[in-house]
Image (tube, rainbow, N blue to C red):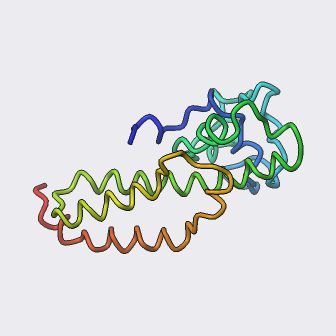
Amino acid sequence: MDEAMLRADCARCEGLCCVGLAFDRSELFAYDKPAGIACRHLTSCGACSIHDDLAARGFAGCMRYDCFGAGQRVCQEMFPGRSWRESAGVARAMFDALRAMRQVHELLLLLREAGSLRLSPHEQERRTALLLALQPAGGWTQHGLRAFEIGSFRQDVRAFLASLRAATAMQPP
């Protein structure tokens, strides 16, 4: 698993989080924005016009958000050459894919961290199987991501991680 794949690279994204996600006016966001509506600070080329001044302008939530590389993966691998600006249908598909891919990337990060533990051969085998399920050989497709049962898979990962409590207790400080 390529570590860079799990880091956000906004330059390779279409501003999916700035459009597809909602936020409520609070100490983290200066105004209410429903999902599917572009943030007023998103430029036509997909960049944030206040990126260098987010906190001072009331957008600390943007600074805290991390897609873990899901945004660029959706744009570059699942929708290459496409944009949410094309049509409502493409936008909806891309935003749905972002939400699902972010969950996939969260689980990949957790399993990657688990690999730093001293795992038994059985635990390592289980971890590898979970990682493989999150990285289909041909890559993710819209259909494959929609069909993937992320909720039940998340439960499998949680159960695996919970089973590692003994391994973490035995790790040297």
Can you say whether 86 is above or below 64 in the image? above
Query: Residue at horizontal 33%, vertical 70%?
Result: 160
For the residue pair 168 and 137, the one nearer the viewer reads as 137
For the residue pair 47 and 98, the one nearer the viewer reads as 98
Query: Residue at horizontal 10%, vertical 56%?
Result: 172
Can you say whether 93 is above or below 44 in the image? below
The residue most toward the front is 138
Residue 95 at what x, y percent from top left?
Answer: 73, 50
For the residue pair 15 and 111, the one nearer the viewer reads as 111
Residue 128 at what x, y percent from top left?
Answer: 32, 57
- Does residue 36 appear left or right of residue 146 in this picture? right
- Does residue 23 appear left or right of residue 6 in this picture? right
- Does residue 32 appear left or right of residue 110 in this picture? right
The residue most toward the right is 87
Residue 78 at what x, y percent from top left?
Answer: 65, 42
Residue 24 at what x, y percent from top left?
Answer: 75, 57
Query: Which quadrant of the figure contains the C terminus?
Result: bottom left
